[in-house]
Image (tube, rainbow, N blue to C red):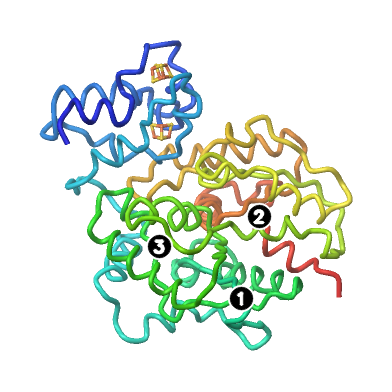
C-alpha cells in the first residue's frame, strides 16, 4: 500500500492537530512521553519502513486514541498495517505463546486439539442440538504459563461459561479441532498465518451447525465476528461474548448474591471494539447486594490492562495495572471484576511480580464468579 492509500485508509490526513486528545488517552504516551500516535504515523510516512520504528510494538492496539479523537483517526489499524513484514519486537513469555500461535496456524501436532479442550469435565452438558457453540480460546495455554493466577483458573472460565449456559438449558457444542483465533498474529503482522487460522476455525464452526458462537474472550469475539468476516466474507453464524447471551436471559437465572463491593474493568475489545458495556454490568449487578461502583474511566473510556498483542511489555504494562488497581481502590471497590482471560492474565502477571500482592483489591473473572454463585 502506498503512502496516499495508507493516509486515506486510516484517515491520517483528517488529523487537525487538535489538543492532542489521542496522546492524552494513550497509555504508552503517558508512560514514556513519546509514542504520540499522530507523530508516529507521520514519522513512518516520512521515513518509510526503513526507519527506526520500534515504538510500533509498544502500542497495545487499545483504540483509546481513536475513541478520544474528534475525527476518529484509526491509529490502531494503521499501526497493525505498519507491522506487517517486521519482526523487530520481543514476544513476552519467552516466546512460548508466539511459538504456540504460529504452530496452531501451521498445523499442530496430533493431540493438540485434545489438549485445548482439557478443561472439559463430566459435569458439563455439551451437545450439538442447541444451535449454540462455545469457542473457548487459549485457556489451556494460559493455565500452562504459570502467570500467578490460581492454577487451573483459565480452564475454570470455560467450565463456568458452560455451567451458566447449562442452567439456561443450553448444552453448547464445542469445536472438534478449535485453534487459536489468531488475534495476536493478525495484530503483529502475520497475515498469512492469521488467514490459515480464520479459514480453519470458520470451517470448524460451520461443522457444528451452530448459528450462535459464544466466546469468553472479547478478542476472540471481535476476531471471529469482524476480522474473520473481513478476511473470509460474511459467515453463517453470529458471534457474541458469553456475557451478552447470559445478560439477555438474566431473568431466567437465580444467584446467591454476596455483599462485596465490585467495580468492573471494561476490556478494550468488549467496550471499544464491540461496543458492549451493559451486558457484563447486568450480570455483575446480580452477584452482590451492593451497587456496583462505576470507575471514573469506564465503558469506551476505560484504559487498557496493558496486554496488547503480548509483545514488548515494559513499564507501561505495569503502570496500566497499577493505575487501574489504585483507581478501583480509591473508588471504594474491594474487587475489580473483568470479563477477559487476557486481562486476567495480565493483572495476575503484574500482581505476581510486584508488591501489589498486598493490594486490598482482588481481581476476579466475571463468568467464574457468576457460575460459582448460581443458586443450588
Ligand atoms: S491504540 Fe492505544 S497504545 Fe496504540 S497509539 Fe492508540 S492509544 Fe496508544
Ligand atoms: S486527537 Fe485526532 S485530531 Fe487531535 S491530534 Fe490526535 S489524531 Fe489529530
Mark 3 touching mark 1, by CB under 8 A?
Answer: no
Asked if 163 appears above or below 40 in the picture, the reply is: below
Asked if 172 appears above or below 51 in the picture, the reply is: below
Q: Mark 2 CB in 8 Å range of ligand 1?
A: no
- For image coordinates 29% across by 31% down, the residue present is 9
**Helix or strand or loop: what does disc 2 sit on?**
helix
Q: Mark 1 points at which residue?
A: 172
The nearer-to-camera label among 2 and 3 is: 2
Calculate the distance from the C-alpha at mark 2 to the C-alpha at mark 3. 19 Å
Q: Can you say which quadrant of the picture contains the N terminus?
A: top left
Calculate the distance from the C-alpha at mark 2 to the C-alpha at mark 1. 15 Å
**Helix or strand or loop: what does disc 3 sit on?**
loop
Considering depth in this image, is 345 or 197 the residue closer to the camera? 197
Q: Earlier in the sequence, mark 2 or mark 1?
A: 1
Residue 18: image location, x then y, percent = 42, 11
Residue 348 as seen in the image, left or right of residue 201 = right
Residue 168: image location, x then y, percent = 75, 71
Q: Earlier in the sequence, mark 2 or mark 3?
A: 3
Q: Name the residue under label 2.
A: 244
Hey, which quadrant is residue 61 in on the image? top left
Disc 3 crowd rating (10 Å Cα; few below 14, some 14-19, many 20+) is many
Residue 274: image location, x then y, percent = 54, 45
Disc 2 crowd rating (10 Å Cα; few below 14, some 14-19, many 20+) is some
Disc 1 crowd rating (10 Å Cα; few below 14, some 14-19, many 20+) is many
Q: Name the residue under label 3.
A: 181
Residue 152: image location, x then y, percent = 57, 73
Mark 2 touching mark 3, by CB under 8 A?
Answer: no
Amino acid at each position: 500500500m502506498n503512502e496516499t492509500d495508507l493516509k486515506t485508509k486510516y484517515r491520517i490526513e483528517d488529523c487537525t492537530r487538535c489538543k492532542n486528545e489521542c496522546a492524552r488517552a494513550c497509555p504508552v504516551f503517558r508512560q514514556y512521553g513519546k509514542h504520540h500516535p499522530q507523530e508516529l504515523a507521520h514519522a513512518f510516512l516520512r521515513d518509510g519502513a526503513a526507519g527506526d520504528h520500534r515504538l510500533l510494538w509498544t502500542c497495545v492496539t487499545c483504540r483509546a486514541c481513536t475513541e478520544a479523537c474528534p475525527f476518529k483517526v484509526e491509529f490502531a489499524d494503521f499501526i497493525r498495517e505498519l507491522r506487517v513484514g517486521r519482526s523487530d519486537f520481543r514476544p513476552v513469555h519467552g516466546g512460548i505463546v508466539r511459538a504456540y500461535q504460529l504452530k496452531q496456524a501451521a498445523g499442530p501436532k496430533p493431540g493438540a486439539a485434545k489438549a485445548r479442550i482439557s478443561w472439559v469435565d463430566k459435569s458439563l452438558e455439551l451437545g450439538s442440538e442447541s444451535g449454540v457453540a462455545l469457542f473457548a480460546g487459549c485457556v489451556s495455554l494460559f493455565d500452562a504459563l504459570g502467570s500467578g493466577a490460581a492454577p487451573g483458573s483459565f480452564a475454570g472460565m470455560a467450565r463456568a461459561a458452560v455451567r451458566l449456559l447449562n442452567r439456561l438449558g443450553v448444552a453448547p457444542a464445542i469445536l472438534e479441532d478449535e485453534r487459536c483465533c489468531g488475534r495476536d498474529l493478525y495484530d503483529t503482522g502475520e497475515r498469512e498465518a492469521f488467514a490459515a487460522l480464520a479459514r480453519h476455525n470458520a470451517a470448524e464452526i460451520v461443522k457444528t451447525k451452530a448459528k450462535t458462537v459464544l466466546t469468553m474472550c472479547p478478542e476472540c469475539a471481535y476476531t471471529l465476528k469482524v476480522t474473520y468476516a473481513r478476511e473470509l466474507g460474511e459467515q453463517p453464524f453470529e458471534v457474541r461474548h458469553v456475557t451478552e447471551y447470559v445478560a439477555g436471559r438474566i431473568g431466567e437465572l437465580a444467584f446467591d448474591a454476596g455483599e462485596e463491593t465490585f467495580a468492573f474493568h471494561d476490556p478494550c475489545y468488549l467496550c471499544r471494539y464491540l461496543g458492549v458495556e451493559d451486558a457484563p454490568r447486568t450480570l455483575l449487578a446480580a452477584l452482590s447486594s451492593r451497587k456496583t461502583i462505576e470507575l471514573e474511566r469506564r465503558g469506551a473510556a476505560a484504559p487498557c490492562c496493558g496486554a496488547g498483542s503480548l509483545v514488548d511489555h515494559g513499564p507501561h504494562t505495569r503502570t496500566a495495572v497499577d493505575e487501574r488497581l489504585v483507581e478501583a481502590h480509591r473508588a471504594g471497590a474491594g474487587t475489580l471484576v473483568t470479563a477477559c482471560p487476557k486481562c486476567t492474565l495480565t493483572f495476575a502477571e503484574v500482581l505476581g511480580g510486584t508488591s501489589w500482592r498486598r493490594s486490598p483489591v482482588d481481581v476476579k473473572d466475571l463468568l467464574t464468579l457468576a457460575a460459582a454463585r448460581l443458586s443450588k
